[in-house]
Image (tube, rainbow, N blue to C red):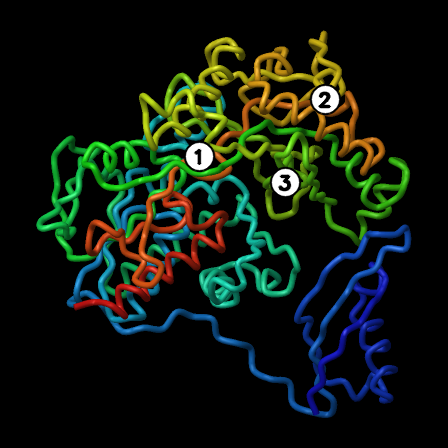
Amino acid sequence: MKNELNLVVSPEEAANEIRIKEIAAKQLFTSPENITFFKVLKRSVDARSRNIKINLRIEIYINETPPQATDYTFHAPNASTKQPVIVVGAGPAGLFAALQLIENGLKPIVIERGKDVKSRRRDLAAINKEHIVNPHSNYCFGEGGAGTYSDGKLYTRSTKRGDVNKVLELFVGHGADENILVEAHPHIGTNKLPKIIQAMRQTIIDHGGEVHFETHVIDFIIKNNAVKGVVCNDLKNNTTLEFTADNVILATGHSARDIFELLHKKNILIEGKTFAMGVRVEHPQALIDSLQYHCTMNDVEKKRDYLPAASYSLVHQAMGRGVYSFCMCPGGIIAPCATSPGEVVTNGWSPSKRNNPFANSGIVVTIEPEDYHKYAQQHGPLAGLRYQQALEQMAFMAGGGTQTAPAQRLQDFVSSKLSSSLPDVSYQPGISSAPLHSLLPAEIGKRLQMGFKEFGNKMRGYLSNDAVIVGVESRTSSPVRIPRDTETLQHPQIKGLYPCAEGAGYAGGIVSAAIDGQKCANAIHQFKV
């Protein structure tokens, strides 16, 4: 007999399979010996009180043969001779679109300006150690997209947009731990994602698709308001290539500024949109653990025997705008995510164990079109992009004209005081003291000061000079939207062009981008001529 139970247990009990069986057996009025198999379906931590609990939903088999393990292997016919579809971008949207196209009997041709996931590492090392930014291969561009080397969090609120479980199961089928199907906030980790992404690429190739790296789209082939392919620069050989197809999925990510500029130059409709910018804040992880797990710093180590590195989610309304935490990375590292020389951009990531000594998070302010109106007359729908760019260039100059980032102790920032010293941080290129309270535009800086004060009231001890802010966090989402029809998902002007995911303004994060990639692939299958 199979049963499902919801259990509320202590962290120690949650780590003890024998104890879980005993608790479950008591609820089912049976003996633990009668439980032949149990499986945790969902797990979450409830740390709202000092008496921390773990919520479990479990599937239990009583006096019954355990079920066979689920096969998550990708199965689909070979698509090598099928109708081609060009997928621009090999981030989560592009990769999951390609897999869905294969399932739908179409051949994906994936074009990625950056390098394969392994080769990217040398360019990331160059940013961290030599302050050299490769505009085609960096934390944002390359196989796997921005998420591959900046964390791999899989938490999403996009359950109404598509099948989240299918996305997670595809990750598991390509090497991710099955725990991502269980945890309330699943996380793969930057140290594990590269092999998973490589496995996805191999699946695409094995099933008849194509994947082209260091191939940069520089133009669209358009005839009679219908896309017919793309023109590319082969970055390895410095030659021009053309790929032809009647459908193009544009999954280029939130940082592909040249794509927005190309569309605008060709009079293809794009729009400015709301986005967010701010800073990265970094605390000692032990401090966040003590605040969230209601214990002293001395007791943190005991708590962490059974609990993960603590995270937080904070939001406040300041002067009519949202100030909120974004991409919180427990046990993480702040990364340099510029995509062009002359700018400083920060983001964060965590390894799978989340065992680094620092916790970092973006703290950002909602940016509305009225904030960047002074750029609108000259730049039109690219005004938000130029505003974003100006902030990143300010950070570059404030840090000394390298990837060294401007920084300030948190309490000093709130008090509008230049920091005379700075703590150790995880940001490898280094930090330098700067008056971010005056360098940031008032619409961002003043609201951040108000937000941090309120966060200090919500989490006593959060507003501390042991914490440091690092500028700037500016790539939370695209400042530009590429419009599309709500039913067919095609661009309203260009037949066969499918704006997709973060770069088009329709998703944010790995899972929601993957779902949007699948949706575009399904739309092509549904509406193809």
Q: Residue furthest left?
A: 223
Q: Amino acid at mark 1?
A: Tyr
Which residue is disc 1 drawn over? 139
- Residue 385 position by quadrant: top left
Q: Residue shown at 47%/65% (left/top)?
A: 162
Which residue is disc 3 drawn over? 329
How far apart, in angstroms, are the residues tagged by discs 3 and 2?
18 Å
Q: Marks 3 and 2: which is nearer the front?
A: 2
Please state the total of marks drawn on the protein image. Answer: 3
Q: Residue shown at 78%/52% (left/top)?
A: 307
Q: Residue shown at 16%/68% (left/top)?
A: 529
Query: In the figure, 190 relative to 203: above or below?
Result: above
Q: Residues within 10 Å of mark 2 (few under 14, many from 20)?
A: many
Q: Amino acid at mark 2?
A: Leu
- Residue 95 position by quadrant: bottom left
Give x and y (percent) for residue 140: 42, 36
Which residue is disc 2 drawn over? 410
Check disc 3 and report its element: helix, strand or loop: strand
Give x and y (percent) for residue 15: 79, 62
Check disc 1 and report its element: helix, strand or loop: loop
Query: In the figure, 24 relative to 340: above or below?
Result: below
Disc with the residue nearer the chain's start (2 vs 1): 1
